[in-house]
Image (cartoon, grey):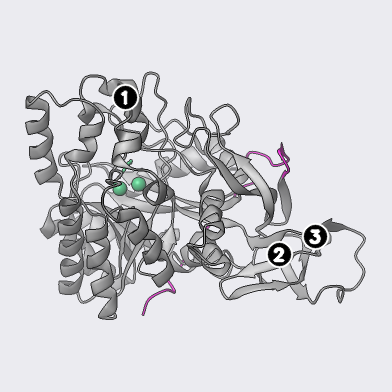
Amino acid sequence: MTYLIKGGTVIGPTGASPADVLVDGEKIVALFAPGAAPHQDETIDATGKYVIPGAVDAHTHMELPFGGTHASDTFDTGTRAAAFGGVTTIVDFAVQRYGEVVQDGLAAWHGKAEGNCHIDYGFHMILGGVTDDSLKAMDQLVTDEGISSFKLFMAYPGVFYSDDGQILRAMQKARDNGAMIMMHAENGPAIDVLVKQALERGETDPYYHGVTRPQELEAEATSRAIWLASVAADCPLYIVHLSASKALEQVAAARDQGRNVFAETCPQYLYLTLEDQLGAPGFEGAKWVCSTPLRSKHENHRADLWRGLRTNDLAVVSTDHCPFCMKDQKELGLGDFSKIPNGIGGVEHRVDLLYQGVVDGKLSLARWVETIATTPARMFGMYPKKGIIAPGSDADIVLYDPNGQTRISAATHHMNMDHSAWEGWEIAGKIDTVISRGTVVVRGDEYKGRKGHGQYVRRGLSDYLV
Ligand code: DUC
Ligand code: ZN
Ligand code: ZN
């Protein structure tokens, strides 16, 4: 089907301009000055709307096994919720557990996702064990499977943790095959000492999850990862879920030297705090137990992170979507914060929450689109198929109403969670229409998409390297 999206203002990484967008089948075929397009029988009226590329969430965890349970969104529920939030592509983390063959972990993730996704999806690979075999597998995944990024953990000893020697070996391999190393940068062994000491003092509430993961241990790990990448001949390095000022300083210093060091942050670190959320009365704070943790409102983290987004020291905003219900899941940590499954669900709200940053004067319109769509597509080898409104690109398009209003609540969200980290928040802007490869999947509050529409995206190497 061919149709024209008429009367809107197209926003891209270089700014805004009024334009009409011609879609043919699954692709964008042309952009026209307003009114200049040949007549089309089918049109979508975008008057008064921003026309932005479908958002790309490069960090989600559907069905992740964690802390004795599984993240509560399946690929079905999670990608449907993502579509409601203006997301047309996710990149989820396939998991190689310790001792498992990498390709078997990947096959398991394909098994979970295939036929169940409402929007397009790709995979990063979590390496739970760095061995000769998994290093070899990295080459095969880059060459044959469209997986060009690998996540390692400096945290969670005994679960996902890799030591410095293992990290260095994986970085050397990535340097050779062009892949990106994604790093969970927190000093896990030191955190485990602080956790044990806190529990011995009887400090068991969710608040202490934050206290026992101080920003120094994020900054130290970030710095160590940057040095290790330097030893690996400037292997491309991407720090995930950066939350703290001191960690940002490490990234900024490396970038000032022209290094291939990049970082993302997430909406929770831009808005929420250790005191107001993690420190909520009783067990309530469990809703916001995630790692890296929320930071203190008495320090400058949130302002520094917004600044980092403006200066591109933070290139991407992802969600680290990893939802757990309070009932039976977060509750596993009643009386012991270290047993609360780590994660916040937010795949549905990132586009709106970042638009609020535009309204608040913290981000330009162009930077909004760049950080939620264009740069993640470029960073992870999906551009220009994804992340841009341009001829030849997939017709992944969101009509966004800048004058609308969004109210967030567990009663109305579509994620499979019995609470919302953003309950009662009223924010500016509203998703109006979401188009995935030419098909309207959301119009207003109505769902028009279908399970199985989403296709696996084979990714190339990053085109964001300096
Ligand atoms: N952090 C989380 O909060 N959840 C899943 C894994 C992670 O690194
Ligand atoms: Zn992580
Ligand atoms: Zn994560």
Residue found at x 48% / y 32%: 420
Residue found at x 78% / y 58%: 46
Q: Which residues are magenta?
A: 443-466
Percent x, y of residue 75: 51, 38
Which SS type dominates the magenta stretch? loop
Q: Which mark is drawn over residue 281?
A: 1
Percent x, y of residue 154: 19, 51
Q: Secondary structure at mark 1?
A: loop
Q: Is residue 251 left or right of residue 417?
A: left
Amino acid under disc 2: Lys
Residue farthest to the front, as pictured: 298
Asked whether 374 falls inside the magenta stretch, the response is no
Percent x, y of residue 433: 71, 50
Proximity of marks 1 and 3: CB atoms separated by less than 8 Å: no
Q: CA distance from mark 2 to mark 3?
A: 22 Å
Dot 2 surroundings within 10 Å: few (below 14), some, or many (20 or more)?
Answer: many
- Which residue is labeled 3 in the image? 47
Q: Earlier in the sequence, mark 2 or mark 3?
A: 2
Percent x, y of residue 339: 23, 27
Asked whether 457 falls inside the magenta stretch, the response is yes
Amino acid under disc 1: Pro
- Residue 374 or residue 103, whichever sits in front: 374
Quarter holding residue 229: bottom left
Of marks 1 and 3, the one in the foreground: 1
Q: Earlier in the sequence, mark 1 or mark 3?
A: 3
Q: Secondary structure at mark 2?
A: strand
- Which residue is labeled 2 in the image? 27
Of marks 2 and 3, the one in the foreground: 3
Residue found at x 11% / y 23%: 202
Q: CA distance from mark 1 to mark 2?
A: 50 Å
Q: Earlier in the sequence, mark 1 or mark 2?
A: 2
